């Protein structure tokens, strides 16, 4: 899954807006949930419940360690969920040396938050909500 990104703050959100790649890989999620529809729904709803906190953790990170912890946690959640564009963006921003409050930190937090929102919208559509 390694691929270069020219600008992690905009590249993935631009691709997601164009519909490529898919925001949510449901085949992956079905594999993760052992094709249990009830469990799949629980996992998707859990992401929806936690999404605002993930975004807040990114915005409120006060130092590099807090930033890395927030983005690393979200990356793991996204990988398990099958939200690969979100996981890739998290991976790219996790590797960046971002000082809290810097323009780079703000831009990365906004880009990741936007993709969290887009992923949540995709999940709501999937759930028929």
Image: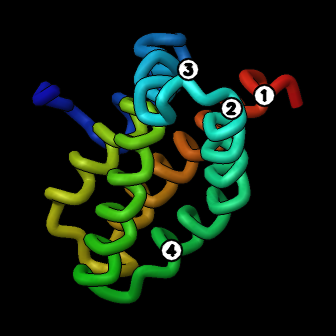
Residue sitting at 39 percent across and 31 percent down? 85
Q: Position of residue 81 (x, y in %)?
A: 47, 39
Q: Residue furthest bottom?
A: 62
Residue sitting at 29 percent across and 38 percent down? 88
Which of these two is toward me, 103 or 73? 73
Q: Determine contact: label 4, label 2, CB under 8 Å.
A: no
Q: Determine contact: label 1, label 2, CB under 8 Å.
A: yes
Label 3 – label 4 distance at C-alpha: 24 Å
Q: Determine contact: label 4, label 1, CB under 8 Å.
A: no
- On the image, numbered disc 3 is attached to which residue? 17
Which of these two is toward me, 90 or 12? 90
Residue sitting at 69 percent across and 46 percent down? 42
For marks 4 and 1, the one nearer the N-term is 4
- On the image, numbered disc 1 is attached to which residue? 127
Q: Position of residue 91 (x, y in %)?
A: 24, 48
Looking at the image, residue 81 sits to the left or right of residue 64; the answer is: right
Task: Identify the secondary structure beneath mark 1.
Answer: helix
């Amino acid at each position: 899954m390694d691929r270069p990104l020219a600008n992690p703050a905009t590249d993935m959100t631009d691709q997601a807006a164009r519909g490529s790649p898919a925001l949510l890989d449901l085949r992956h999620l079905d594999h993760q949930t052992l094709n249990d529809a009830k469990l799949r729904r629980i996992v998707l709803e859990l992401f929806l419940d936690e999404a605002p906190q993930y975004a807040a953790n990114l915005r409120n990170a006060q130092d590099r360690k807090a930033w890395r912890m927030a983005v690393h946690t979200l990356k793991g959640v996204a990988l398990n969920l099958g939200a690969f564009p979100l996981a890739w963006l998290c991976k790219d921003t996790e590797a960046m040396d971002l000082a809290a409050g810097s323009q780079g930190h703000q831009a990365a937090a906004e880009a990741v938050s936007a993709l969290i929102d887009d992923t949540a919208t995709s999940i709501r559509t999937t759930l028929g909500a």
